[in-house]
Image (spheres, grey):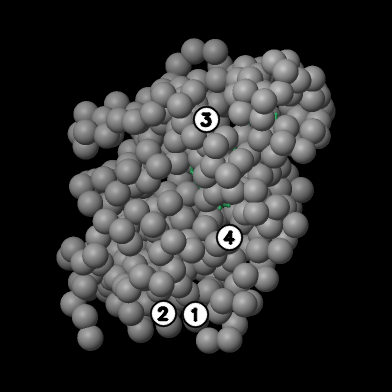
Amino acid sequence: MTDKKKILITGGAGFIGSHVVKRFVRNYPDYQIFNLDKLTYAGNLENLREIENLPYYTFIKGDIVDAEFMNGIFAEHQFDGVIHLAAESHVDRSITNPLEFIMTNIVGTTTLLNAAKNCWNGNMENKKFYHISTDEVFGSLGKEGFFTEKTAYDPRSPYSASKASSDHLVRAYFHTYKLPVVISNCSNNYGSYHFPEKLIPLTINNIKNNKPIPVYGKGENVRDWLFVEDHAVAIDLIFHKGKIGETYNIGGNNEWTNIDLVHLLCRIMDEKLGREPGTSAKLITFVTDRAGHDLRYAIDSSKLQNELGWAPSLQFEEGLEKTVDWYLANEEWLNDVTSGAYQKYYEKMYHKR
Ligand code: NAD
Ligand code: TYD
């Protein structure tokens, strides 16, 4: 038996979750970390290879929508804290299949809230339920202004509507049942282990393979990009020091139009691959715009900076170079996730146990 603090991280085999799990397993030997993940197409245990055999790290395959299962693992392990990242996360997929987003993001989050409430009933002391959300819940900005923690919710895609709904439910459990919750809303992340359906890894992968780079509409939409490890640092800070019942915005203060970002990536890739300057830019192809495409996201993270002392650590060019280097050095990972072969990894690693 152990008296270590038990932390449940959901979605820990995904892009951001795997960075958070690795950070917590490495930095907090006093914790026992449980990573619960359904291993959808976006979940990949190879992202966690470096820590998979460390003591006090446990992987649990499971679906947050399954109430009996979730209540069971809470009863068995008596978690002290939850960091909830499991979600369907890709806007384009939400446009073609909204129901999957409703199930995982809304029903799944509520199931998790219920499991925590049932387990902690009457003893909320030193407990924390941390819900990870997105700036997309605030809708779309014009050319001016920033999202603050007080900005009214105005989600416009099935993805952002499902995340907004989950945020509301988390707050409802705080007010109604006194569940000790904290929420953060972050801007677009980039970095290693990012599934190549999202703009940055997709562009890197297509340039590498000399395939067209699809830019939606005119490429004028603006996103505020943050290095994923800076998000993991913010999550660590908020989990430990964030005030119960509060919300924190996290952002890179780093706005780029998609077309400028793609051109920058083309320049970096030409250099790294030893191609003539201008070679990759020839792959840029303007395609039909995303339905309901939000024009601009930009985060004001001054509350997090002032109250908890967080700041982004990297300049964008530096972060992008690191990211490109990682993708070029990890060809096998990229080939596996694009071929679907990584799904066999779980079978190989865990099915026999
Ligand atoms: P991701 O799609 O890479 O990973 C999601 C993980 O959740 C996967 O490992 C998947 O297997 C798991 N999962 C999905 N459905 C599940 C279910 N029903 N039960 C258990 N596990 C399930 O996503 P990401 O980009 O790492 O995002 C993580 C979280 O951060 C999400 O909540 C997302 O809304 C939020 N977020 C993401 C960004 C971003 O730029 N990627 C920005 C802000 C907030
Ligand atoms: P994405 O990485 O899907 O993140 P999000 O939609 O959550 O912001 O897309 C980032 C931006 O890039 C968004 O404005 C849509 C655009 N985009 C493209 O132009 N082409 C693509 O192939 C993809 C995937 C996205």
Residues 247 and 308: in front is 308
Query: How far apart in space, not on screen, are marks 2 and 3 (Cα)?
Result: 39 Å
Residue 259 found in image quarter? top right
Residues 292 and 267: in front is 267
Asked if the residues shown at circle 3 and circle 4 are in contact, with their CB atoms under 8 angstroms apart, the answer is no
Question: Label 1 belongs to which residue?
Answer: 69
Q: Amino acid at mark 3?
A: Leu
Question: Label 3 belongs to which residue?
Answer: 320
Mark sitting earlier along the chain (3/4): 4
Q: Amino acid at mark 2?
A: Ile
Asked if the residues shown at circle 3 and circle 1 are in contact, with their CB atoms under 8 angstroms apart, the answer is no
Question: Label 2 belongs to which residue?
Answer: 73
Q: Position of residue 52 (x, y in %)?
A: 44, 68
Helix, strand or loop at label 1? It is: helix
From the viewer's perspective, is the residue at label 2 or at label 3 nearer?
3
Asked if the residues shown at circle 2 and circle 1 are in contact, with their CB atoms under 8 angstroms apart, the answer is yes
The answer to whether the residue bearing label 4 lies less than 8 angstroms from the nearest atom of ligand 1 is yes
Query: How far apart in space, not on screen, are marks 3 and 4 (Cα)?
Result: 23 Å
The answer to whether the residue bearing label 1 lies less than 8 angstroms from the nearest atom of ligand 1 is no
Task: Give the crowd class for mark 3: few <14, some 14-19, many >=20 residues within 10 Å.
Answer: many
Q: Position of residue 186 (x, y in %)?
A: 44, 38
Question: Label 4 belongs to which residue?
Answer: 43
